[in-house]
C-alpha cells in the first residue's frame, strides 16, 4: 500500500516531535527508513533520535535535492534496495529560501511521486513548515498530497488534484533570455564544436573545472537529444544573471512522459530518458517546457 501524506507543522519543535514519532514507529517494527531533510533540521533530528540513529539512512536534502528533479530517482533507488518491504521515507523538498523556480519544480516532484510510487509498498511523509513557507506553497501541498496531517488526526485533502494536471500547472512560461545571450545554432555533425564553445564560455566565467565539466556534459546531452529526437537541429543560448549560469536548448521535439529523466534509467534498456536524467544529476536546476511545435530545456548552475 502506498501513502503520501503532507505534514503541516510550525517550527522546529513540532517538526522534531511529529517526524520523530514517524521514524521511531518504523524502526520499532524493523522497516527501512530514509530521512532526507535540509540541514540544520537534519542534525537536530539526528540528535533528537539518537537512540535509533544507526537504524536510519540520512540525507541532506539541501544537497540531494538542490535540483528537485533528482530527488525522485534517489527515493526510488532506496525503495528498490529493499524489495518486498514497506519503506518509510521522510522527504522535505521545499523550504524557506528556495527560489520560485525551485519551488515550482519541487511541487512538480511532489505530484510525480504519486505516479512513480503508485502500487508500491511505501509511506512518504513530506513536512511543510507553514510558519515559514509562502501561502501558495502550502496550497500546492494540499493539491499534491492525498492525505494531510496537522495536529493529531490525518484527513483526506479536498483539494488533491490529478498529478498530470498539477504538472501542467507547473509549466508556467520561462523568462525570456536576455538579448546579450550567446546564440549558437547546431545540427548533426556539429556537436563537438558546441560542447567546446560551451566549455570555453564557462571557463571564461570562472566556473571551477569539475563544475565546468558537469555543465559541459549536461549541455552535450541536451544538444544530442535535439539531434536524435528534436528534428536533427536546435539552438543553444548561454547567459548569466547575477551568480547563475543558464544554458537553454530549443528544438522541434517534445516529451510526453512527465517522469522522463526523473527515474533512474535502466542501464540495459533501450528506452529513452538517460540524457535528461544526466542533466538533472549534473545541474542545480532543470526546467523543461513542451510547447506547440517546440521543446525548451533550460539548465541552471550557480557560479558559487
Image: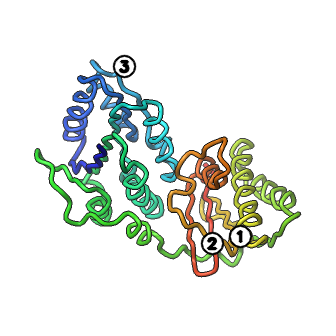
**Nearer to me, 132 or 56:** 56
Instruction: For marks 2 and 1, give the CA distance.
Output: 8 Å
Answer above or below: position of 163 versus 34: below
* Display coloring: rainbow
Q: In this picture, is 80 found above or below 140?
A: above
The local secondary structure at tag 2 comes to strand
Q: Secondary structure at mark 1?
A: loop
Residue 263 percent location from the top left of the image: 53, 49
Q: Quadrant of residue 140?
A: bottom left
Q: Which residue is mark 3?
A: 54
Q: Quadrant of residue 90?
A: top left
Q: Name the N-terminal-most of marks 3 and 1.
A: 3
Any part of residue 79 in sight: yes
Count of labels in the image: 3
Q: Is residue 43 left or right of residue 301?
A: left
Reading the image, the residue beneath label 2 is 295
Residue 59 spot, x, y in % from top left: 44, 34
Q: Residue at x 22, y 51 (%)?
A: 8
How much space separates mark 3 and mark 1, taking CA atoms? 48 Å
Sequence-first disc among 3 and 2: 3
Q: Is residue 98 visible?
A: no
Q: CA distance from mark 3 to mark 2?
A: 45 Å
Q: Say left or right for 270 vs 94.
A: right
Frontmost residue, 145 versus 98: 145
Considering the numbered disc 3 on the image, is that residue within a helix, a strand or a loop? helix
10 Å crowding of disc 3: few (<14), some (14-19), many (20+)? few
- Tag 2 and tag 1, C-beta contact below 8 Å: yes
Q: Which mark is residue 230?
A: 1
Amino acid at each position: 500500500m502506498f501513502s503520501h501524506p503532507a505534514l503541516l507543522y510550525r517550527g522546529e519543535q513540532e517538526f522534531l516531535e511529529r517526524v520523530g514519532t514517524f521514524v521511531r514507529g518504523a524502526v520499532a517494527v524493523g522497516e527501512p527508513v530514509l530521512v532526507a531533510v535540509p540541514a540544520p533540521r537534519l542534525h537536530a533530528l539526528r540528535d533528537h533520535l539518537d537512540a535509533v540513529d544507526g537504524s536510519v539512512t540520512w540525507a541532506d536534502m539541501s544537497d540531494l535535492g538542490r535540483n528537485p528533479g533528482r530527488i525522485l530517482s534517489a527515493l526510488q533507488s532506496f525503495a528498490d534496495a529493499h524489495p518486498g518491504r514497506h519503506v518509510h521515507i521522510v522527504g522535505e523538498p521545499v523550504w524557506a529560501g528556495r527560489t520560485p523556480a525551485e519551488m515550482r519544480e519541487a511541487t512538480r516532484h511532489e505530484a510525480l511521486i504519486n505516479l512513480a510510487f503508485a502500487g508500491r509498498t511505501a509511506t512518504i511523509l513530506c513536512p511543510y513548515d507553514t510558519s515559514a513557507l509562502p501561502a501558495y506553497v502550502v496550497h500546492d501541498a494540499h493539491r499534491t498530497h492525498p492525505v494531510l496531517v496537522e495536529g493529531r488526526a490525518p484527513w483526506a485533502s479536498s483539494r488533491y488534484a490529478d498529478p498530470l494536471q498539477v504538472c501542467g500547472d507547473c509549466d508556467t512560461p520561462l523568462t525570456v533570455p536576455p538579448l546579450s545571450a550567446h546564440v549558437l545554432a547546431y545540427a548533426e555533425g556539429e556537436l563537438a564544436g558546441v560542447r567546446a564553445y560551451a566549455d570555453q564560455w564557462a571557463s571564461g566565467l570562472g566556473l571551477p573545472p569539475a563544475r565546468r565539466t558537469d555543465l559541459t556534459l549536461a549541455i552535450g546531452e541536451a544538444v544530442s537529444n535535439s539531434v536524435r529526437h528534436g528534428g536533427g537541429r536546435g539552438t543553444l543560448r548561454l547567459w548569466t544573471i547575477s551568480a547563475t549560469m543558464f544554458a537553454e536548448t530549443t528544438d522541434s521535439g517534445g516529451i510526453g512522459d512527465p517522469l522522463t529523466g526523473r527515474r533512474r534509467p535502466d542501464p540495459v534498456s533501450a528506452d529513452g530518458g538517460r540524457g535528461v536524467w544526466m542533466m538533472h544529476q549534473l545541474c542545480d536546476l532543470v526546467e523543461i517546457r513542451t510547447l506547440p511545435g517546440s521543446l525548451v530545456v533550460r539548465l541552471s548552475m550557480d557560479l558559487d
